Image: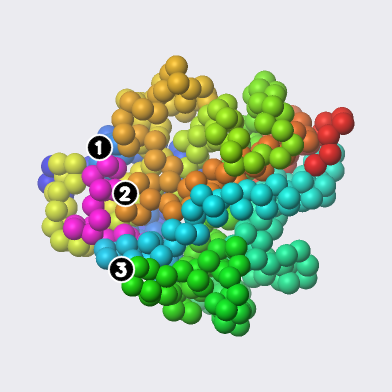
Amino acid sequence: MRFDEIPAERGLPLLGHTVAWLQDPIGLPLALHRAHGDVFRHHIFFERPVIFAHPDALGAIFADEGQHLSTAAGWEPFFGRLMPGGLLLRDHADHRLHRGLMTAAFSGAAMEGYVRRMNERVPALLRAWRGGQLGATAAFRQVTLDLSSILFLGVEVGPQLTALSRGFEALVQGVAALVPWALPGTSIRRALEARARLVAYLRERIPQRRAEPSPDLFGQLCQARDEQGRAFSDDEVINHTLFLWTAAHDTTTGALVMAAYELAHRPRWQDRLRAELHQAGDDLVLARMGQLRETEWLIHEVLRLYPPIGSVPRRTLRPCEIAGVKLPASTPLRASILLAQRHPAFWSNPHDFDPERFSEERAEHRRHRHQFRPFGHGAHVCLGGRFAMLQLKCVLHHVLRSFRLSLPPGYALRLRPTPSFRPRDGLPLRIEPIAGSTP
């Protein structure tokens, strides 16, 4: 297919489909997919990217490690100002070098330590929850902020943690900003100011972390060395710490909120998971996490329907062909994880919530190698994907053993698309303490 043969829609003048996507971030891509098939163009945020929905195309895009496609150029409009130097803003050998230096922070030994700290901290955080109704997004955001601050920065509870969390939250909101100009009063301006404060905080502590090893991610990045003895510079430590902190916090928060929404609909699934989690014991140690089969099915189904990143951006470096489509140089494109994970050719009733599709008996996710890729794939696969799964299991373990979840009568879900999928109203979640349980 030639570039000029790709089905295209322009949408509104100037704005294209931006407003429609903000109002319905899942319904719009699904409607365009139904209308135009597995390859189409649309107009969003002043660009007209080519959207690829078929798992074959996703596999080709993920397999390209810089021969024809640039990951850095794809992500630059989103992260360039606030997250310079992050892994997604690096290509080729530069990316491989930096990623290799980080692997120790996500090793098995590091994960075991992270899980141990999560089990110590999550019950204390849940003691602040009371029976009645709470805003699920705010509640889970506080849990993940607290955990990521401890695990990533080594900062314990106190005024310092509160100040860091506020600055970090401003930074996250800037990443999701819809107004791209740093005008006074905008979220971008607040995010840039928050970033400056966070950078100053980290820079002041690097000498001590280089001199005295610590188990948190910040400390491990300060100690990291490659085979030739090369270490990260101070700026690289800061950039990677802020980027990984942002990615870990936001994606986990979104997944926990959407899991709470789906579970609140389904008392039967709450009971099934609660029974499995009780068998795992009070503390969910790393060695037992693999036994939580049904909990993992549920998490996978949440990630299938509401992936942490709906589509992965790239930009062509030179004329090339992707899945039979000829693209000019400097063409923006998107590998749509959302559409592949709801593709009717590979999933039965693809829009229904059905965790058992991930069971060994059905194994729908194995019909195509790239139909289920919530954390991406290839050279830029999410480095913290396993960490995210462990954190999701740990938090759900303590929440479901302590509370029954429900929704207000007649509740209707409306999603916002950024930073990741989550309810527009913060999800008013009803919680009922389970007799005899103590978080």
Q: At which x and y percent is residue 46?
A: 35, 61
Relative to 434, 32 lies left or right: left
Distance from Cα at disc 2 to Cα at disc 3: 15 Å
Q: Residue at x 58, y 38 (%)?
A: 287
Left/right placement of residue 5 relative to residue 239 reads left
Camera-nearest label, 1 or 3: 3
Q: Which residue is found at the position 38% from the left and 68% from the top? A: 226
Residue at left offset 50%, top offset 46%: 386
Q: Which mark is residue 378?
A: 2
Q: Which residue is mark 3?
A: 94
Q: Main secondary structure of the magenta part?
A: helix
The amino acid type found where label 3 is placed reads Asp
Q: Nearer the viewer, residue 332 or 376?
A: 376
Let me know if residue 71 is in the magenta part. yes
Q: For the residue labelled by badge 1, is the local secondary structure a helix, a strand or a loop?
A: helix
Say which residue label 1 marks: 56
In the rendered image, residue 2, in percent from the top left (x then y), is placed at: 12, 46
Q: Which residues are magenta?
A: 58-76
Please name the residue shown 64% across and 36% down the image.
261
Dot 1: few (<14), some (14–19), or many (≥20) neighbours within 10 Å?
some
